[in-house]
Each structure stands twice: as structure tokens, then as C-alpha cells.
DNA sequence: CTGAAAGCGCTTACAG
DNA sequence: CTGAAAGCGCTTACAG
């Protein structure tokens, strides 16, 4: 089979009657090209369907066209969904994503990170929660003077631009929704104490209750760890109470799934006897029965934005001074499914 | 901050008193180097912690050091687990993985694949089921004369080396286990008809019953599609029967989760009144309650092996003549959890 | 078995 | 605003 030669920058230059340099400048958004030349070049680029050779570009330039993604928990569907989106965005932008797992945080993690910076020479880094709040890791990245973006960070909010959703508002609204549906006795399972979103969701829940002058007994509130087991323990405690709540809001879907199981053990039909709300809208939410009412996180959008910020030179301008570019709060939505019910009737 | 210069092949060559070429040969496993020279070079490589620059290598050589992964279903935890492992293995071998989604199979899919081959110039491809059985896709890859490995293929078994587990044997054994536990009335939910593993699992179930001379009424067997909804429909049908089974074996975990929900609706306690078995040991299996008894697929091992075969030059030797290298059947294991119970007592 | 030269396809740095 | 030269760090192809 004859192997088709890939179009090179030279081919474009020849056909457009300019030098390679000019083509290179056009492609790299260099300002110093006349509009006329730029258009001429772009026309040929499209005709020839030219796509720069990433390896040559990487070799010649100071940029590596690698981006790194650091994550903690490989099993979470949050992580894998984010990863898939990030991979897709990177490919579209001619970058490659290097993924590094940082669970079991230890000295090796830091060495692995340093290798990512020094050997792979990533141009930028994305940190998922909760690794994005680890001070030692942040310090290494800051020392290397590397651009990085954090997803839903909790601390050091001025250390880097970050992307998040309004966890507080989402929890507030979904709690409000339960109240609208007639619920007054609403239990809550708090998320993992290491994650900032846990506090935000908890506060949203509390404030929604307060704004309706609803008091909730302390036994209705349990600490969880974002996993199924902790959710089950918490739910068993709450549902063992003499005076049971009519609804339980769990800080993520995994724990909400556990609430479903606990309700089952207590022979409490969901949603007839107990409404259950989760958070995240992971795949689990529409896998278990009844399907969970939950809050959808814009995971794909977060990933795409992170890659976009890091790959487009925009990052250089970012600073605390430039607030608008610094903090990105994306929209969530509340998904009502079969696990909640209006009890005003 | 002073940027540390990366060690280059020249640095190694200089320190080892040989030419760059010799270092290159040692690193690329070229046979024609004396043992003495090889050792000398390797010693320096280790001392300097030299790691070749992938981009330079890629640019100079005919290999791209890119591997492609084609998958269908992005939401399956099977897919994401495979992906994560493959990513890890690739990085360890100096390769990069380009991931391409082929769901909604259409003309665009083929074009995207051609781009992967012609523009990205992948050195090899991994196909996940069921895309690995698509004849048009296979034809494109074969025409391009590209090495590829399929995971759990159903058809065209001689078209490429493949990796799988013994789905038949696993289904046989897990059904046997149910029989040992006293179950005689065992329902079954078949997997998606497009996937070869569905038939293998079904056959394993049938043969286990037959080997114990157990007859099962046809109403105990339902067709599913590997998703929750189809599993729910199937389970509702089976559990609506007057003479209910004491156990249901679903062809994957998602459908087994649905059986749990259906049992719940019929007020059948699991495992007291109904034992439930899944397949795959995805995260879901240990998330829902009760935790599922299921078959663990060696997903991580499959991914690592696929990358290993494609990245090590071994592939060139592979052919039908070399059977041992052609068909890789990895070990499974049966995981017993809380969804099954012995009823002989 | 080992090496000197050329080149992969880009960008950097310097000119004009 | 545009271009000619040099070089990124490797490997291929050719010598010896």
C-alpha cells in the first residue's frame, strides 16, 4: 500500500507563496502578520487540510504540548468522566494528556510529579479534588512556575485559577425544592471532611432550612465520607430514630444509593415514605432504582474549559488582578427523578 | 529558577566514550552491539537517568509511538477501567495513547479512524467490544496493514491476536456454585445479542444445568441488553411467574443491580428469598446493597497485556502460525458476596 | 560490531 | 511585516 505523505508546513508555504516562517506565524496566532497574508495562508491550510506535526513542533519549541492531569480516586465515575472529556479536548487542540494517579499520597507522589514537570515537561497541570488542596503538591508546582488549574479547590484560592460550580447554591436550591414539596423533617449526610465542597453543600442545606425557619434535630445530620459504606452507616443511624425524617439529602450519589439500601432494610418505600436526594448525577444515579433526584455537575464542561485555558495562551494574562478569568463558576442543574415525592397532598 | 537541562543521547555517548548511534542501538534493543559495549552504555544510562526524548524519536523514526484505543460505550465502568490501565501502561513504555470514541457508529467513525491511522500514524490499535467485531472498521485497519489487538472479540477470530477471559467457563462455574448451594430453579438474563460474550455466558449457564440434569422452564430465561432498564424488564417478567426461581444469574452487574430492584418491588429479600449473581465485578457490584456475588474480569491485566504486545516489537512475529502468542485467555475469579445464599439447610 | 552524515518538520533568533 | 539559517534530539541509511 502506498503510504500517503503527510502535508508539511513547506507544502503549505510553497502553495501560498510565502516562507515556512509566515505559515508558522499564522498557525501560532502570532500578531505580526498582515491580514491579507493570513487569509491567503489559512485558505491553503484548509485546502490541504494541513495539521502541524506535533512532535516536530514539540522538539523545536520550548513548549511541550503536554498537559498533566493529577487525580486521587481512580474508581470514582467523576474522575473517569472528567478524564474522558479532557482527553477529547486535548486531542482537538493538538495536546497530549499525561495522567498521573496520586492516591496513597506519599513521597513517591511528589517524585512522580517532579518527573512530570522535569522529564515530560508538561506545559500545565490540572488538579482534581481533593489533591488540589495538598500544600506540598501545590508548592512543587508553584516552584516550577508552571501554570495550573484546580477543580473545586477548597483552600489557597488565590494560588491558581480554578473551576467549580456553586455547590452552596445547588444544595440550597435542592433543599428548597424538598421544602416546597412539603418536607420539614429533612436529614443530611455530610461529605468527606477533606473536601471543600462538603462544607459548601452542608451550608447550603442549613441555610435553606433556616430561611424557612425550620429547625432540624442534630440526630438528623450525620458525617459521611462520600463512599457507600459511610453513607449506609449514616443512613442506618438516621433511620433508626423514633421520629424519622421524611427526606434525606446525601452529599453525593454513592451515599444516596446507600440511603436507598437502608430504607429498604427498614421497609420504607422510596419515595412514598422517604424522599432521597443525591449530588453529582453520576451514572449510578440513573442505574439504581428508583432513579435518584440529584444535582448535575457540569463535569464535561469543566474539563473542556480547563484544557482550553491551559492550551490557549490566555493563561499568561491570568492573575489575581484579572478576576474575571480567574474564577470560573459553571452552571449546575437539578435533576428530578423518582426518588423524591411531593407530600403536601 | 534555573531550568535543569534534560540529559540527551549525546551526553550519554560522551560519558560512555561511544557514538550516539551505539547508544541508540543499545536503547532500541538492536542486536548488533557487543555485550561489553552494551553494559558500558547501560551503566551510564542509569547513572545519568537518561530517558529518550519521545518527540525527537518520533520525528526521526518511522514509528509514531502512538497507540490508539477504540471504544463504544463511554459510560461503562468497564471502558473507563480499561482506559486508565492502558494509559498507565503506555506511559511506562514511552508511548502515548490516543482514545477514540466510536459510539453512534456511522460514516464519521470511519473517517475518524482513518485520520487516526494517516494523520496521527498510530503504531497499533486496541479495539474494545463490541466495536472489535465491526467488519468495516476491521477492513480499514487491515488495509492499512496496522497491528491491532482485540478484546473479547466474537467474530473473525483469525483477523488479529486477541485477549479475552473464559466467559463460558466462568458462567459454568458460577452456575455450578449456585447449584452446590442448593439452587435448582435458576433464572438467567442473557446479555446484549451483539456481543459474543453473551452467548458464551449463556452457554456456560445452560451446560452447568445440563451437567446436573436440571431442567429449567423457558420462562426463566430472558433476553437483556446489558443495561439496567433491560435487566429490570427481564427481572420483572421472571419474578412475575407463579413458580419463581430461587436464584437469578444476570449476564452483567448492571442487570444484576436491576434484579435487586425488581426483587425489592416483589418484596423478595435478597439473598434470603432470592440469590442474585452478576458478571464483571465493576464498581457497581460493591456499591449497591447487598454487594453482588459476581465474576471478576481481569480488566487491568487485559489492558496491560494489550499495550505490552503492541509496544514490544513482539507483534511482528505474531501470526496464526504462532498460536501461543495469538490467543490470550486470562484468568477470572469468582467473587462471593452477600447477594447469594446456601439454601440446602 | 561501530561511526559520521543527513534529515525528520517544525520554531527560535537574527536580519532586513 | 517577512524570510534565510541554524538547531531541537533523535534515527535512517550508508560506510567501514
Image (cartoon, coloured by chain):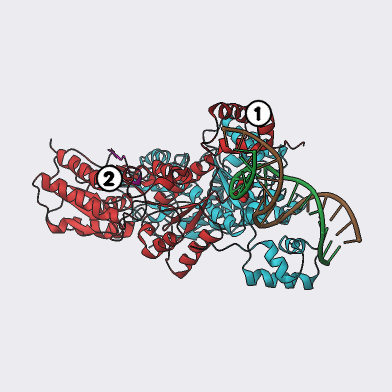
Chain colours: A red, B cyan, C green, D brown
From this view, report whether residue B232 is shown above or below residue B13.
above
Q: Give the total of numbered labels.
A: 2
Q: CA distance from mark 1 to mark 2?
A: 49 Å
The x and y percentages for residue B88 are: 54, 57
Tell me the residue that label 2 is attached to. Answer: A166
Q: Which mark is residue A283?
A: none
Residue A329 is a magenta residue: yes
The x and y percentages for residue A168 are: 24, 47
Tell me the residue that label 1 is attached to. Answer: A16
Quarter of image, res A226: bottom left
Question: Callout 1: 10 Å neighbours few (<14), some, many (20+)?
Answer: some
Q: Chain of mark 2?
A: A
Mark found first going from the N terminus, 1 or 2 = 1
The residue shown at (25%, 46%) is: A277
Q: Is residue B64 at least partly visible in the picture?
A: yes
**Which structural element holds mark 1?**
helix
The x and y percentages for residue B338 are: 38, 59
Question: Callout 2: 10 Å neighbours few (<14), some, many (20+)?
Answer: some
Quarter of image, res B5: bottom right
The residue shown at (69%, 67%) is: B12
Q: Which residues are magenta?
A: A325-339
* Image-based side of B242 in relation to B227, left or right: left
From this view, report whether residue B263 is shown above or below residue B336.
above
Given residues B335 and A133, the one toward you in this image is A133
Quarter of image, res A178: top left
**Can you tell which of label 1 and label 2 is closer to the viewer?**
1
Given residues B121 and B15, the one toward you in this image is B15
Residue A10 is a magenta residue: no
Q: Is residue B344 at least partly visible in the picture?
A: no
Callouts 1 and 2 on one subunit? yes
**Which structural element holds mark 2?**
loop
Classify the position of the C terminus of chain B by image quarter. bottom left
Amino acid at each position: 500500500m502506498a503510504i500517503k505523505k503527510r502535508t508539511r508546513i513547506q507544502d503549505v508555504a510553497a502553495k501560498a507563496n510565502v516562507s515556512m516562517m509566515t505559515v508558522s506565524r499564522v498557525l501560532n496566532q502570532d500578531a505580526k502578520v498582515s491580514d491579507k497574508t493570513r487569509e491567503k495562508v489559512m485558505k491553503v491550510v484548509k485546502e490541504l487540510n494541513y495539521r502541524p506535526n506535533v512532535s516536530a513542533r514539540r522538539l523545536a519549541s520550548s513548549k511541550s504540548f503536554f498537559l498533566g492531569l493529577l487525580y486521587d480516586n481512580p474508581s470514582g465515575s467523576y474522575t473517569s468522566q472528567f478524564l474522558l472529556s479532557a482527553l477529547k479536548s486535548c486531542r482537538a487542540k493538538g495536546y497530549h494528556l499525561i495522567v498521573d494517579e496520586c492516591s496513597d499520597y506519599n513521597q513517591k507522589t511528589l517524585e512522580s510529579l517532579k518527573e512530570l514537570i522535569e522529564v515530560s515537561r508538561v506545559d500545565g497541570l490540572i488538579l482534581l479534588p481533593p489533591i488540589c488542596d495538598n500544600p506540598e503538591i501545590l508548592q512543587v508546582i508553584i516552584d516550577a512556575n508552571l501554570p495550573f488549574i484546580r477543580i473545586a479547590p477548597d483552600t489557597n484560592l488565590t494560588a491558581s485559577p480554578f473551576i467549580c460550580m456553586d455547590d452552596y447554591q445547588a444544595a440550597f436550591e435542592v433543599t428548597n425544592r424538598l421544602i416546597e414539596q412539603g418536607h420539614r423533617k429533612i436529614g443530611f449526610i455530610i461529605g468527606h471532611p477533606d473536601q471543600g465542597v462538603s462544607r459548601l453543600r452542608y451550608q447550603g442545606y442549613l441555610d435553606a432550612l433556616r430561611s424557612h425557619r425550620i429547625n432540624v434535630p442534630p440526630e438528623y445530620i450525620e458525617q459521611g465520607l462520600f463512599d457507600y459504606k459511610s453513607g449506609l452507616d449514616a443512613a442506618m443511624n438516621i433511620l433508626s430514630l423514633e421520629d424519622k425524617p421524611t427526606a434525606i439529602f446525601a452529599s453525593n450519589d454513592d451515599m444516596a444509593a446507600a440511603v436507598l439500601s437502608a430504607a429498604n432494610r427498614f421497609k420504607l418505600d422510596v419515595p412514598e415514605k422517604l424522599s432521597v436526594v443525591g449530588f453529582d448525577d453520576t451514572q449510578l444515579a440513573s442505574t439504581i432504582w428508583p432513579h435518584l433526584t440529584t444535582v448535575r455537575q457540569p463535569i464535561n464542561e469543566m474539563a473542556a474549559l480547563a484544557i482550553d485555558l491551559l492550551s490557549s495562551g490566555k493563561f499568561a494574562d491570568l492573575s489575581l488582578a484579572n478576576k474575571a478569568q480567574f474564577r470560573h463558576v459553571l452552571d449546575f442543574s437539578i435533576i428530578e427523578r423518582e426518588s423524591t415525592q411531593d407530600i403536601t397532598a
